[in-house]
Image (cartoon, rainbow, N blue to C red):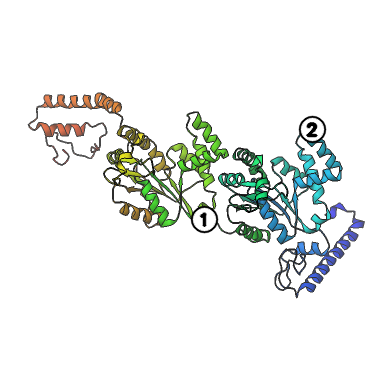
Amino acid sequence: GESDFPSEKRGFVMAYARVAFAVLVLVALAGVSDASAARPVLLRQGRSEPATLRLRGGGVPFNPMTFVKKCLGQTTGPRIIIAGAPASGKGTQCEFITKQFGVVHISTGDALREQVREGTELGKMAEGYMSKGELVPDSVIIGIVKARLAKPDCRSKGWLLDGFPRTKGQAEAMVRAGIAADKCIFLQVPDSVLIERCEGRRTDPETGKIYHLKFNPPPEDDEALMARLVHRSDDTAEAMGKRIGMYKDNVGSVIGNYEHICRKFDGTAGKNDIFAKVEAFLEGAPAPPPPRTKKVMICGAPASGKGTQCEGIVEDFGLVHISTGDELRMHVRQGTPLGLQAKGYMDSGGLVPDSLITAIVKERMLHQDVVEKGWLLDGFPRTAGQVQALSEAEVHPDRVVLLDVPDEILVERCTGRRLDPVTGAIYHIVHNPPPEGVADRLVQRSDDTAEAMSKRIATYHENLGAITTYYQTKCRRINGVRAPKAIREEVKAFIEGSLPPTMSGVPPRRAMPKPEEAMAFVETTMMPFIVKGCAALCKTKPDKPLEYLAHWMIENNPNKPLVDNTADQAPVNKNDVNEERA
């Protein structure tokens, strides 16, 4: 500001500023003029045109200030951070990025070993901690990273920082040290895929090359190689689960520091497809709009026909069918962090919390097939707590299909079901009888008896109100007693949008009372009511006793369903019974 300088020096300062500005303009114009004949290029190394041009057609710079800085010889190479869980594919993408953009790939482990090998002051400090078996403090790691980034190759070419920072403290320390990035790449991969990738990895101790038994198998004819391959101790499912857990504890706070320059990528796609999107991001392309997919929930009591309609929905719309039971068992079997938590509850005989089930559902929705095709959530949520947990996890359906079937039909459907323990096929002794030779081995599941089914239906009705109330503007109640084809046609029309939701303002159906509740109602309410009616009948002795009793019961009903005793109504003659009302 002018107030910062004495008046006698102010003229000199302003003149100097004008001259400096003129020099910048002349240098910029000279650079553009010299490059005007060049074809349009992007910020890449290894091409015939210098990376400092970054021109559109006609020689106009993409970023004028960056262009001027390059002309003046300052450091303007791209500064990139890549983040992701272990086995998320960072290494593969780093190879693509360094080859295409010519940046310097920096791994904190490599930088640390280099400092130790060169015997620098930072290297000696790090070696002192490592010799004691202690972790190298963030302050030392940040110093090593800063020293590496200050070298000429990083200043001229730019840098790619691989898997660092890993914690909020490291991210904040980088900011304090003045280490700033231009772009942050975040690879997202579901836990189950990460564990599958790690469990199959095998390392050649001689060459350091890593193979995968499924995705990148070693040559089977090389017996010597096959014999020396090792499975690292941190590549087991148990160890990988712990590493993923530690990663998840920190990734949110790390990415939060770079949210303004970060873009997330689906790490389950093909490596070339991922890099095509990464390349566009680094070149400044805007983020593509998210794919428009359908998100559907299907609800209904046990044996309401959800399974049959799910098959139709998947066939009609190509959605990914998500069953919470299947997903839970898969996580437990693979030993993922979520699966290990769930197994702890299951082993102790407890129920898996709603928040954990919701986290498993949310994790499944990160898979590439769900992102591209949309999802069909089968029989979940079942309770008000699960509805709330899904809402907090920002899982919101576009349509909710509710199959409505009377309770007595549900019981009949279930009690007739039989399971083939050999094939897992389900038959019904009336509606879908088994073929010959199968009937003798069929079994009835313990939860398909009439008694068990009545309890399951009662539990369903107790929780249905919370679900239909929350999703009332998206839900359609569909008659589930008709032929499957007719139901499927209505479901399809509703999901397509040609039929509206019909739940708005509709109260949930009351649950069937338990036997003890029904008996208590009869003894405390019905019996006294009937006794009073009979006493009134005996006292009045009307000519038409049945009509009188019917009229009396309507008039004295505690709920008053048909009576509106307003002031402008004519008095009712109890002896003149309205036939229709009776």
- Observer-nearest of 325 and 279: 325
Residue at image point 76% right, 69% down:
49
Q: Residues within 10 Å of mark 1 (few under 14, many from 20)?
A: some
Give how far across and how far down residue 477 sits, in percent.
Answer: 35, 47
Residue type beneath disc 2: Lys
- The tag earlier along the polypeptide, 2 or 1, is 2
Q: CA distance from mark 2 to mark 1?
A: 50 Å
Give how far across and how far down residue 85 sits, in percent.
Answer: 64, 45
Residue type beneath disc 1: Glu
Q: SS class of the residue under badge 1?
A: helix
The dot on residue 141 is: none
Task: Look at mark 1 in the image and give the residue it sits on.
Answer: 372
**Tally of numbered discs:** 2
Residue located farthest toward the bottom when viewing the structure as drawn? 37
Q: Is residue 125 left or right of residue 434?
A: right
Residue at image point 76% right, 74% down:
36
